Amino acid sequence: MVTAHHTGPNPDQAQSPIVGRIEHWQPGELTPHSHAKHQLMYANKGVIHVSTTTGEWLLPPSRAIWINAGTQHSFRVKRPAETNVLYVDPKRYRLSEGQQCKVVNVSPLVRELILSCADLPWDQLNSAQERLAHVLIDQIQILDQAPVDLPLPTDPRALRVVRILRDEPANREPLNTLAKRVGASARTVERLFARETTLSFGAWRHQQRLIFAMERLAYGDSVTRVALDVGYKSASAFVVAFRAQFGTTPAQYFKAR
């Protein structure tokens, strides 16, 4: 089980509308739980996987994720990580109505706002501190949503396919073979993914590969090694796919951030 090391009182009981703390993570998983407050989590170091009943989100460095209050979520960490987490009063600030989680690209301004708000007092804020918190929430509202989310199916047969591809990221088996491994037909699996994730199976698999690759690249692994490990025949084919998804090459993407 993953452990998040931190000190201080329970943030759900803090009086201030926004409070923050640094959390240090060791490899493992944190079982589903929820908070009475919204969470805004920013990855300082490492990569965090966030899962709910409807999908998975990847939080590499320089990304932030907003988790609405009351949302059951779990975390998975493969290597040590450090996050800056803000706990936000849902009665004072709202963001994504009807949306459980939202991952955004963090601009330099938002990064400094997150770090500043993490140092705010836990009892009450003065007017200047309140204005700072308002600016942060306003900025989060207008940031571009980052395309690193992966909707999950709910049918047990489709979820078995998900587990296979999660455990075998370089798997290149055709859908017919995968479907037989989970006791279903290819047509059934395709229909389940289309209905429950709004993506074709091929599109879902492509997204899953890129998310796995994003994590490895965030840790500094080479593009060539990552490309082969996620099932691409060459680094150039992977770079083309990465550019189509993120608008730039892997090297340019992580250099910019």
Image (spheres, grey):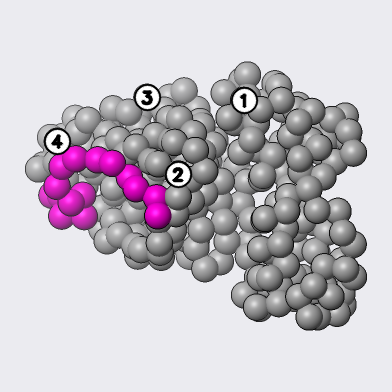
- Earlier sequence position, callout 2 versus callout 1: 2
Mark 1 touching mark 3, by CB under 8 A? no
x 79%, y 28%: residue: 224
In the image, is residue 142 above or below residue 167? above
The magenta segment: 1-15
In the image, is 168 to the left or to the right of 144? right
- Label 2 sits on what residue type? Pro
- Amino acid under disc 3: Glu
According to the picture, the residue beneath numbered tag 3 turns out to be: 112
Real-space CA distance between mark 2 and mark 3, rounded to the nearest whole angstrom: 27 Å
Decide which of tag 2 and tag 3 comes sooner along the chain.
2
Q: Quadrant of the N terminus?
A: bottom left
Q: Distance between the residues labelled 1 and 3?
A: 24 Å
Q: Image quarter for residue 234?
A: top right
- Please determine whether, in this image, residue 178 is positioned above or below residue 244: below
Per the image, is 16 magenta?
A: no
Q: Position of residue 184 (x, y in %)?
A: 81, 80
Residue picked out by circle 1: 220
The 10 Å Cα crowd at callout 3, few under 14, some 14 to 19, many 20 or more, is few
In primary-sequence order, the first of circles 4 and 1 is 4
Looking at numbered disc 4 in the image, what kind of residue is underneath it?
Answer: Pro
Residue type (three-letter) at the residue carrying disc 1? Gly
Left or right of 78? Residue 203 is: right
C-alpha separation, residue under disc 3 versus residue under disc 4:
17 Å
Q: What element carries label 1?
A: loop
User: Disc number at residue 121?
Assistant: 4
Quadrant for residue 23, please give it.
top left
